[in-house]
Amino acid sequence: LLLCLLLSSGQSKTLPPGTFFLPLDARGAHTLYWRLDYDDRTVSMELHSQVPIGSWLALGFSDYGDISSADLCFFWTDWRGHTHLEDTWTTEDGKLYRDAQQDCHNWGWQREGDVIKLVFSKKFDTCDDYDYVIEEG
């Protein structure tokens, strides 16, 4: 899960204290930043991703990084140009479903050139059967 990434990620001296980051690919096109709020039991995430206009993004939690049986915050743009961030989950065979309990909160985004910056927060434990519990370990 996400907190396991702390072992292989860095903490930058140029970012606010307590902000962690992790490049998600070898060429640096996708980078995840996050902060933990233990008092509120929330993780705040910011994903920087180089993607073409109109592309969708998903940031998720699963066993071994698989798309199957995953808990995802899914960002997409509809045909009218309206953006959405939805809490979704996938089955063992990778079918995507919208979660009835929406737990990807406080979201926003902006585009800078070819980079989308997506921010949102999520509780460590949402008490939702389709969400992963974010825990240390």
Image (spheres, grey):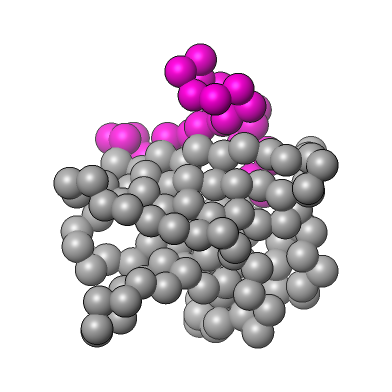
Asked if 53 appears above or below 16 in the picture, the reply is: below
Q: Give the camera-side residue of 62 and 72.
A: 72
Asked if 61 appears above or below 14 in the picture, the reply is: below
Asked if 92 appears above or below 110 in the picture, the reply is: below
Asked if one can make out residue 64 in the rendered structure from this viewpoint, the answer is yes
Q: Quadrant of residue 20?
A: top right
Q: Is residue 129 left or right of residue 110?
A: right
Is residue 87 part of the magenta span, yes or no?
Answer: no
Asked if one can make out residue 66 in the rendered structure from this viewpoint, the answer is no
- Residue 120 image point, x, y percent: 54, 55
* Residue at the image point whose x is 71% and y is 49% from the top: 42
* Residue at the image point whose x is 26% and y is 52% from the top: 111
* Residue at the image point whose x is 41% and y is 67% from the top: 75
- Residue 15 image point, x, y percent: 49, 24
Magenta region: 1-28
Q: Is residue 88 left or right of residue 81?
A: right
Q: Is residue 70 left or right of residue 15?
A: right
- Residue 74 image point, x, y percent: 47, 68
Is residue 16 part of the magenta span, yes or no?
Answer: yes
